[in-house]
Image (spheres, rainbow, N blue to C red):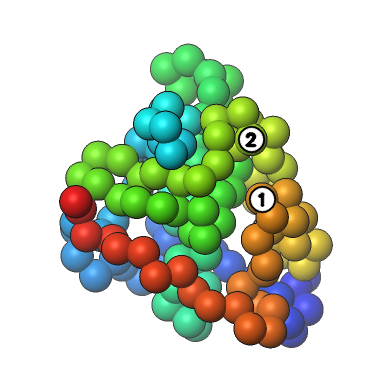
Amino acid sequence: MADSSTPILEKLSDSEQTVETPEEDVRGRKVADSDGNEIGKVDDLLIDAPERKVRFLLVAHGGFLGFGETKSFVPVDAVTRVTEDRVFIDQSRERVAEAPVYDPALTDEPDYYTSVYGFYGYPPFWGAGYVYPGFPFRPV
């Protein structure tokens, strides 16, 4: 169970919340690195329900036709650009492939999110001085 400093997050698809407009919903879009190399697709969004903020993309990558694919979280801090069909991040395909694997049993453990943020080199959103990334969710 998460301590009071680490909020419990939930998948958007499991919540009663919605994305404000369909254009802002990035689920199902391809994920690409800054060079345009395809990494995978946005399977879901992990949200901080009380704050009404997306904290992580749940990215499905690897495998073939959905078989053998792996899912891992990518902090929204990594998003650099959003287009009509892609979400670009500042991480390489290889880096995402090495990320801690999504395990639903660990999502209430405080150290799990800390390890994901540490892996990508971002400060956790619950830390002092954290500023939510200001990136456009309007297709460009």
What is the secondary structure assignment of the residue under circle 1?
Answer: helix
Q: Which residue is mark 1?
A: 120
- Residue 16 sits above or below residue 51 on the image: above
Image position of 99 (left or right of 140): right
In the displayed structure, 3 sits above or below 83; it is below
Locate residue 43, reporting x and y percent.
Answer: 43, 43
Q: Quadrant of residue 122?
A: bottom right
**134 to the left or right of 84:** right
Q: Name the N-terminal-most of marks 2 and 1.
A: 2
CB-based contact (under 8 Å), mark 2 and mark 1: yes
Q: Secondary structure at mark 2?
A: helix
The residue under label 2 is which amino acid type? Arg
Q: Position of residue 120 (x, y in %)?
A: 66, 50
* Residue 133 position in % (x across, y down): 46, 69
Residue at (55% x, 30% y) in the render: 93
User: Does the rendering let one see residue 14?
Assistant: no
Task: Specify few, some or many for label 1: CA neighbours under 10 Å numbering under 14, 14-19, or 20 or more.
Answer: some
Task: Give the percent coordinates (x, y) of residue 62.
Answer: 54, 23
What residue is shown at x 69% (from left), y 55% (from top)? 121
Viewer can see residue 139: yes
Q: CA distance from mark 2 to mark 1?
A: 8 Å
Give me the disc on residue 95.
2
The image quarter containing residue 88 is top left
